Image (cartoon, rainbow, N blue to C red):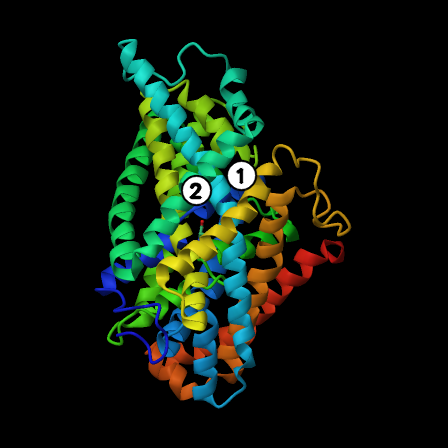
């Protein structure tokens, strides 16, 4: 099933389920478990969640369908696929520049994603040590970090940041595993990894949520996440909700186009896109329902920011029954989720290198993974020896960002929206209508709606994120 010229896909996914698991694995990641609860917490909960859901289904879902469709139609890497669709539509292949932006964005996101995933690995080791000592002390189902003061527990994050060697070590482990999986190919690498990790992830997610529901403040968490208080809803929050929807669905970063290129011709794309968006949103909400009951149970601040998951939750685990085991399960869950996403981040650029330069898959994975690894080293150093560095000090919106935050900000605020804008304009205005109708398989009514979204709603909304993201002073 390999494409006419695309070489990266080999024989493609072995089934629709394999594709679904891989695509859901790409979508579900640190964005759901770390970024979504952080943003919901910082932006007052309910109202933010509502806007986020609206963004996912009104704009994100049609874009997911578009990207997967471009991939399956073009059967190449992200840039090549857009060029093929353009050719078949009789328009300029220059539209593929948006594919190029997606590939570059994926490469950059991978670099810092691996560093943050490395923090999760560090906490996996911490929790393994804690489980071992609780077993040793004869209390295997006790709270985590028995007898430790709160500042010692929260201090672990600082200890990690203080040890560049440890941070680099964790980043190295994560990147090596990612490269190994991608080097093994679509079928034997990506598909097998997602097929094992995603079911394990879901079991852990449901188990910890049930645990939180029984031992934590579930009702308070439900109220926090689902009672919209629109007075808390600032324009920046709306802006962040749309940006988070793009990031969480893995839009604008080559993953979905590339994975789409390996999808069989018989797969109906619209329901498949619906399942990806629904699963991703379901996991984001479940993550909220997993994390906030635990946060509220011990009176922690839901608006703690990016340290919520890594610094606050261990405190909660230290005060809850079986906290040691639950803590271990929790960080393993984050690791699994991050891994299925990083694979997709690597695959986009790797497919491009294979298609474009004819490299062997192993070599392509080493070159791209190695490059992202080096940039990741800089991100890690940004927490340590380079903590004074502010790469875009001259640009007010990025002026206070360290290296990692700068790359996160530039990709999230500029590159992802720009790529999404390009894709929606391309599909909404330039791509051949009959081709789009045939490939999406939408009914006439849905097709009209879909076209409206791609031609007007998505470009406008995404343009606004770009504008206000870059010039917050306009708000
Ligand atoms: N969607 C992933 C998450 O929510 O963590 C992040 C991501 C993966 C973004 C793959 C982009 C991508 F291509």
At 56% from the left and 44% from the top, the residue drawn is 229
Secondary structure under tag 2 reads helix
Q: Which residue is mark 2?
A: 33
Q: Name the residue at the bottom extreme.
A: 90
Secondary structure under tag 1 reads helix
Q: Quadrant of residue 139?
A: top left
Residue 460 relative to residue 449: left or right: right
10 Å neighbourhood of mark 1: few (<14), some, or many (≥20)? Answer: many
Residue 131 relative to residue 88: left or right: left
Q: How far from the left and from the top, in percent, is residue 349?
A: 46, 62
**Front-lying residue, 384 or 246:** 384
Q: How far from the left and from the top, in percent, is residue 465?
A: 62, 60
Instruction: Evaluate whether residue 349 shows in this view.
Output: yes
Instruction: Evaluate whether residue 282 shows in this view.
Output: no
Q: Which mark is first along the chain, 1 or 2?
A: 2
Image quarter (top left, top right, bottom left or bottom right) of the C terminus? bottom right
Residue at mark 2: C-beta within 8 A of ligand 1: yes
């Amino acid at each position: 099933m390999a494409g006419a010229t695309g070489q990266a896909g080999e024989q493609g996914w072995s089934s629709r389920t394999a594709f679904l698991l891989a695509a859901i694995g790409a979508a579900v990641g640190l964005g759901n478990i770390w970024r979504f609860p952080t943003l919901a917490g910082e932006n007052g909960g309910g109202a933010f969640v509502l806007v986020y859901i609206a963004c996912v289904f009104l704009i994100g879902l049609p874009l997911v369908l578009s990207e997967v469709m471009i991939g399956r139609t073009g059967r190449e890497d992200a840039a090549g696929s857009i060029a093929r669709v353009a050719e078949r539509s009789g328009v300029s292949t220059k539209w593929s520049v948006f594919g190029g932006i997606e590939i570059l964005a994926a490469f950059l996101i991978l670099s810092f994603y691996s560093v943050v995933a490395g923090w999760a690995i560090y906490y996996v080791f911490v929790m393994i040590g804690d489980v071992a000592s609780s077993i040793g002390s004869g209390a295997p189902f006790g709270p985590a970090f028995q007898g430790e003061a709160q500042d010692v527990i929260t201090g672990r994050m600082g200890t990690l940041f203080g040890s560049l060697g440890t941070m680099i070590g964790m980043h190295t482990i994560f990147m090596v595993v990612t490269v190994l999986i991608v080097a093994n190919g679509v079928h034997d690498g990506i598909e097998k990894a997602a097929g094992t990790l995603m079911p394990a992830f879901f079991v852990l997610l449901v188990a910890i949520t049930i645990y939180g529901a029984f031992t934590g403040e579930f009702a308070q968490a439900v109220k926090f996440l689902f009672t919209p208080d629109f007075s808390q809803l600032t324009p920046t929050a709306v802006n962040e909700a749309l940006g988070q929807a793009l990031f969480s669905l893995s839009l604008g970063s080559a993953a979905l186009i590339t994975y789409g290129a390996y999808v069989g011709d018989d797969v109906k794309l619209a329901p498949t896109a619906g399942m990806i968006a629904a699963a991703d949103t379901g996991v984001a909400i479940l993550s909220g329902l997993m994390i906030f009951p635990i946060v509220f149970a011990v009176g922690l601040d839901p608006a703690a920011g990016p340290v919520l998951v890594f610094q606050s939750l261990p405190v909660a685990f230290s005060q809850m029954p079986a906290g040691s085991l639950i803590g271990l399960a929790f960080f393993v869950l984050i690791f699994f989720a991050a891994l299925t996403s990083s694979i997709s981040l690597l695959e986009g650029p790797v497919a491009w290198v294979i298609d474009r330069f004819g490299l062997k898959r192993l070599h392509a994975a080493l070159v791209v993974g190695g490059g992202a690894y080096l940039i990741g080293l800089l991100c890690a150093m940004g927490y340590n020896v380079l903590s004074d560095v502010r790469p875009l000090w001259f640009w007010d919106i990025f002026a206070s960002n360290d290296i990692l935050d700068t790359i996160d900000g530039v990709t999230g605020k500029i590159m992802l929206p720009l790529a999404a804008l390009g894709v929606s304009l391309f599909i909404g205005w330039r791509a051949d209508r009959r081709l789009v109708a045939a490939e999406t398989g939408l009914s006439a009514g849905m097709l009209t709606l879909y076209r409206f979204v791609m031609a007007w709603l998505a470009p406008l909304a995404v343009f606004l994120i770009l504008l206000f993201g870059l010039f917050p002073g306009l708000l």
